[in-house]
């Protein structure tokens, strides 16, 4: 692919995983509040804001490639959120289980971004750099979730 063009499908996959992440943390807020653990809401909202920022940065690249940015999620993300609800109900609201599920979601996010970088020949240098920066920022957030989980 030319150095100034991007594969919009790769970029839309990144937007989808960000949409999944937003919905996952919105669900985590609801479940944490049900469990009386609303203190973690601020951290979850930070992850939502981060993904909203990532989407805002990716959207122009999709549009420059001649497509519309998706507002959808991945099917795997929808199934994962269903599992989060079931697991939360079965564990009777254990915060550690909820944080473990959030951490798994962060791992899935990282995998989608890593896969996109493996297809760097289908991305412009600017897009590749943006994806690397976003992945680096997400990995830091991922580590924070791990620390919360292990406390």
Image (cartoon, rainbow, N blue to C red):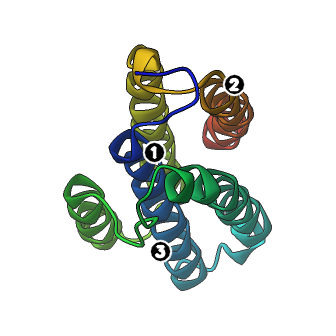
Q: Which residue is mark 2?
A: 129
Residue at coordinates 48% horizontally, 36% vertically from top-left? 6
Q: Is residue 104 left or right of residue 132?
A: left
Residue 69 location in percent, x, y?
46, 64
Residue at coordinates 43% horizontally, 67% vertically from top-left? 68
Mark 1 or mark 2: whose residue is earlier in sequence? 1
- What is the number of the mark on residue 27? 3
Q: Quadrant of the C terminus?
A: top right
Residue at coordinates 47% horizontally, 61% vertically from top-left? 94
Tag 1 secondary structure: helix
Q: Is residue 9 left or right of residue 50?
A: left
Give the class, few, some or many, for how many residues have Cα within 10 Å of label 3's Cα (few <14, many ≥20). Answer: some
Occupied quadrant, residue 4 = top right
Residue 33 location in percent, x, y?
60, 82
Occupied quadrant, residue 126 = top right
- What is the number of the mark on residue 11? 1
Residue 122 location in percent, x, y?
41, 24
Could you tell me how far apart the alpha carbons at marks 2 and 3 are, in whole angstroms?
31 Å
Tag 2 secondary structure: helix
Callout 2 touching callout 3 (CB < 8 Å):
no
Could you tell me how far apart the alpha carbons at marks 1 and 2 are, in whole angstroms?
13 Å
Q: Quadrant of the N terminus?
A: top left
Residue 25 location in percent, x, y?
55, 66
* Towards the viewer: 86 or 12: 12
Mark 2 or mark 3: whose residue is earlier in sequence? 3
Mark 3 or mark 1: whose residue is earlier in sequence? 1
Give the class, few, some or many, for how many residues have Cα within 10 Å of label 1's Cα (few <14, many ≥20). Answer: many
State whether residue 21 is above or below residue 120: below
């Amino acid at each position: 692919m030319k150095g100034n063009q991007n594969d919009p499908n790769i970029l839309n996959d990144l937007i989808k995983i960000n949409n999944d992440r937003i919905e996952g943390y919105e669900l985590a807020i609801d479940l944490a509040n049900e469990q009386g653990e609303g203190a973690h809401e601020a951290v979850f909202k930070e992850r939502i804001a981060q993904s909203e920022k990532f989407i805002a940065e990716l959207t122009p690249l999709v549009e420059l490639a001649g497509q519309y940015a998706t507002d959808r999620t991945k099917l795997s993300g929808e199934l994962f959120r269903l599992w989060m609800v079931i697991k939360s109900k079965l564990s009777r609201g254990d915060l550690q289980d909820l944080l473990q599920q959030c951490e798994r979601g962060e791992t899935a996010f990282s995998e989608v971004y890593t896969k996109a970088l493996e297809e760097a020949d289908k991305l412009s240098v600017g897009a590749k750099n943006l994806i690397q920066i976003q992945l680096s920022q997400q990995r830091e957030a991922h580590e924070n979730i791990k620390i919360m989980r292990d406390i």
